[in-house]
Amino acid sequence: MITVEENNGILVAAFTEEDRFNALITEPVKEKLLPYFSRPNTRLIINLEGIKFIDSSGFSVFLSLMKAANNNYGQLKICNVHPEVKELFKVLQLHNVFELYDALDECLESFQ
């Protein structure tokens, strides 16, 4: 479903065997990622490589994570956003809320 690895102090969450982030998996994803923001200054990247569709419940998870990050001086960034998913971010005006990057390396460098 989702794995989390550390890369130079930055957590990278990546979906495994999924191409849709929808209501069927949002709760377990949220339960896995939200606790990371209980620690101050957590830096987390959500790697959307392979995700071709996100529904409203998926975007709701992103917003919950962003709120938790902001409340505890953390940072949340998103990378490898499929063009159709990026279009959804724009339609929902969420491209102004989240930092979106085309590649993981670019996203990791943005924390420097």
Image (tube, rainbow, N blue to C red):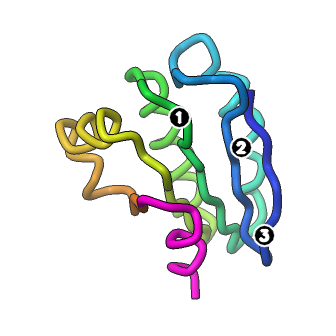
Q: Can you say which quadrant of the picture contains the C terminus? A: bottom right
Question: Which of the two labelled residues, at mark 3 and mark 1, occupies the earlier sequence position?
Answer: 3
The image position of residue 42, as x and y in percent, is: 70, 67
Q: Nearer the viewer, residue 41 or 26?
A: 26
Q: Is residue 86 above or below residue 39?
A: above
Q: Please tell me which residue is depicted at 79% across the width and 41% down the height of the picture.
A: 3
Instruction: Give the quarter of the image for residue 27.
Output: top right
Instruction: Give the quarter of the image for residue 86.
Output: top left
> Which residue is tagged 2?
33
> Which residue is tagged 3?
7
Q: Is residue 29 part of the magenta span, yes or no?
A: no
The image position of residue 110, as x and y in percent, is: 51, 79
Dot 2 alpha-carbon crowd within 10 angstroms: few under 14, some 14 to 19, many 20 or more: some
Residue numbers of the magenta segment? 102-112
Q: Does 101 sit left or right of 48 as displayed?
A: left
Q: Please tell me which residue is depicted at 55% across the width and 34% down the height of the picture.
A: 50
Q: Can you say which quadrant of the picture contains the N terminus? A: top right
Tell me how far mark 3 sits from mark 2, CA to CA: 16 Å
Question: Which of the two labelled residues, at mark 3 and mark 2, occupies the earlier sequence position?
Answer: 3
Instruction: Give the quarter of the image for residue 18.
Output: top right
Amino acid identity at mark 3? Asn
Foreground: disc 3 or disc 1:
3
Amino acid identity at mark 1? Val
Outermost residue toward the top? 24
> Which residue is tagged 1?
61
